[in-house]
Structure formats: structure tokens, C-alpha cells
Amino acid sequence: MVDIRMDGPSGYCPVQAEGTINGSPAYFRARHNSWRLTIAVNGKDPVLPKEEDTLYERSEDYKPDEPFAAGYMSHEEALEIIERCAGEFDRGSKGDLDDKAAYEEKIRKRRELELEWLKKSMGPLSDDALL
């Protein structure tokens, strides 16, 4: 049985939770239009771990037509996501890291969408101004 010990979820913009899953450090964050759960090697920070320190990572878009919806997701929904991901991890999955090419494509598309929203919110700018 999976052992989840998290403080939170709490807050908004972002919704966050931090603790352990099966004794390994874990971090959940939902902001803008996506959420991410990361589980790190013991002794490593799960917030932004190096690839070699990551045991599990899953991220998904959240209401993609609503750019800031993830930051306002209910804490109950965030907990359901954490429990679902913890179950995957408990069954031996590495989440998105099971298919690295698909994961990298997902991140690329998300960055393109975020850049599009940024351009819309900031008005007309050249692409170079945002780099």
C-alpha cells in the first residue's frame, strides 16, 4: 500500500504540497495551465531535481483553454491527482519519464502555449524581446 505523507495541498497560485511518497521526497505544484508531481531520491530536493535524482515525474495540462485555471484547482482535486500519481509510482512507473521523447514533446508544446499567452498579455513584441 502506498504511503503518502504530504503537507497540503494548500494555497492558490500556486497550489502546492510537499512531503514524502513511500519515504521519498515529493512535491506537487499547480499553476497557470498545468500541474506537476515530482518524487526525488532520498536526500535530494524534489522541487527541481536533476534528472539523475528524479524517481518519478508527471505533469499534465489542466483546462488548457483557461490559462490560469491550475492555480485555482480545488485542494480536493489536487489530492486526487497526488494519490493517482503515488499509485503509479508504487506500481513501478516513473511517470512521464517512462517515455522521455513524449515527455520532451509535451514540455515543448506547453512552452509554446505559455509564450503565446505571454505575447497576448504583453502586447506586440518581437520574439527576441522574450528570450
Image (cartoon, grey):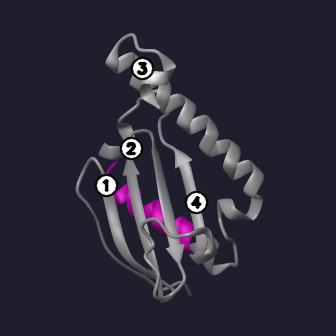
Residue 15 image label: 1
Total count of labels: 4
Of 127 and 28, nearer the camera is 127
Q: Residues within 10 Å of mark 2 (few under 14, many from 20)?
A: many
| Residue type (three-letter) at the residue carrying disc 4 | Arg
Q: Could you tell me which secondary element the residue under label 2 belongs to?
A: helix
Residue 103 lies in the magenta-colored region: no
Residues 49 and 8: in front is: 49
The amino acid at mark 2 is Ala
Where does residue 2 sit, x and y in percent of width and height? 54, 84
Sooner in the amino-acid sequence: mark 3 or mark 2: 2
Residues shaded magenta: 73-86
**Mark toward the viewer: 1 or 3:** 3
Q: Which mark is residue 81?
A: none
Spatial CA distance of label 1 from label 4 is: 16 Å
Q: Quadrant of residue 8?
A: bottom left
